[in-house]
Image (cartoon, rainbow, N blue to C red):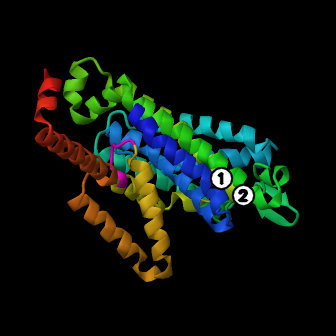
Amino acid sequence: MRKDVAIGLPLLVLAIVVPFAWPTRYVVEEMTLFFIWAAVVTQWNLVFGVAGVFSLAQMAIFAIGGYVTGMLGLYLGWSLWLAMFAGGLAAVVFSALVGVACLRLRGAYVALLTLAITQTMYLLIITDTECFYMEGVTCRNFTGGTRGLTGYGDFGFHQLLPHKYAAFGDYFLALAVLCTATAFSVFIIRSPVGLAFKALRDNTVYAISRGIGRFKYQLLVFAASALFTGLAGAVYAGHFRVMGANTLYLSQTLFLLSMMIIGGVGQIWGPLLGAAALMLVDEALKEVVEWRLLGLGLMLVVFVVVWPKGLAGGVEAIARRWRRDSVRAFAAVRPEEVASAKE
């Protein structure tokens, strides 16, 4: 845990300093989006990387958090601060239901079912054309349909903060969600619960024979990871002030899945590294749109083939090699001290 704190604190300080060192709206907006996606990938890593459940429903859970937040704000007039936590709880309930549906499935069948749930949700939203209420002479449907859900407001930072620093509110709110999600992820992975997840991932039959209930722990990982995913969806809805079906695009799901793979599946700090690397590459390739997908695809292939443990695994391997070489160099120079230390 001390190593995790030693890594996390400098990153937190850096994230706090960034908006003051580079206060441009572009940097603040991009960093806010990075925090949101990193929070989603961090929780997805618990399900996919640590527990070994091949779920592709993470963006559906994200959308539930955002849509519930927006609907409570629009239809019931709730403050988005209260609606945000309701959206997180709704995401937990939805994720638990998805977990129940996947209890008797494994591997690729879980991936197919969860992908089908996500695409069904997408189709239900874009085919929603029934008139739910009239806004002047305009007919609005329940989910917003293809136009997206709008009109529910935001978190009110533009009224609370000076105009120059208004964007900082959403920035630090997204950062708070990411920090809490990361701390939760570290705690789970380092705890006995995390060991149970890894045991079920690596050898399900042996783990069950040792008394680890697959159904209980699978439901637990689905529900636990959903809270912060739903909160990230709520922050996304409040920040952009529109919640649309574009969050459920298959390309968006694969983009976030690539973040986890490039960062390191199952690694604690892999999601953050992967999200940062992929967003930087994606930003660099925006000037050459025709090469964007090809560049991202090649990057993914290179990491899968050459560096399968991702950036986090590679950095950890380099650190281990450096420590080993340092010990050998010290032993070669001062052998008597090494011998006395062993005694």
Which image quarter holds the N terminus? top left
Residue at x 69% of width, y 45% of height: 69
- Label 2 close to label 1 by CB (< 8 Å): yes
Q: Residue furthest right?
A: 136
Which image quarter holds the C terminus? top left
The residue lying toward the viewer, choosing from 317 and 184, is 317
Total numbered badges shown on the rendered structure:
2
Q: Amino acid at mark 2?
A: Ala
Q: Secondary structure at mark 2?
A: helix
Q: Which mark is residue 85?
A: none
- Residue 85 seen by the camera: yes
Residue at x 23% of width, y 18% of height: 210
Magenta portion: prevailing SS class: loop
Question: Can residue 134 be found in the magenta stretch?
Answer: no
Q: Left or right: where does residue 31 sit relative to residue 3?
A: right
Give residue 115's position: percent from left, percent from top: 41, 52
Q: Quadrant of residue 89?
A: top right
| Residue holding disc 2 | 167
Give residue 152's position: percent from left, percent from top: 77, 52
| Residue holding disc 1 | 171
Residue at x 30% of width, y 53% of height: 310
Q: Residue furthest top?
A: 211
Question: Can residue 264 be found in the magenta stretch?
Answer: yes
The residue lying toward the viewer, choosing from 100 and 32, is 32
**Vertical position of residue 252 compared to residue 187: above or below:** below
Q: Amino acid at mark 1?
A: Tyr
Mark 2 Cα-neighbour bin, 10 Å: few <14, some 14–19, many ≥20: many
Give residue 331's position: percent from left, percent from top: 13, 38
The magenta-colored residue range is: 263-268
Q: Quadrant of residue 258?
A: bottom left
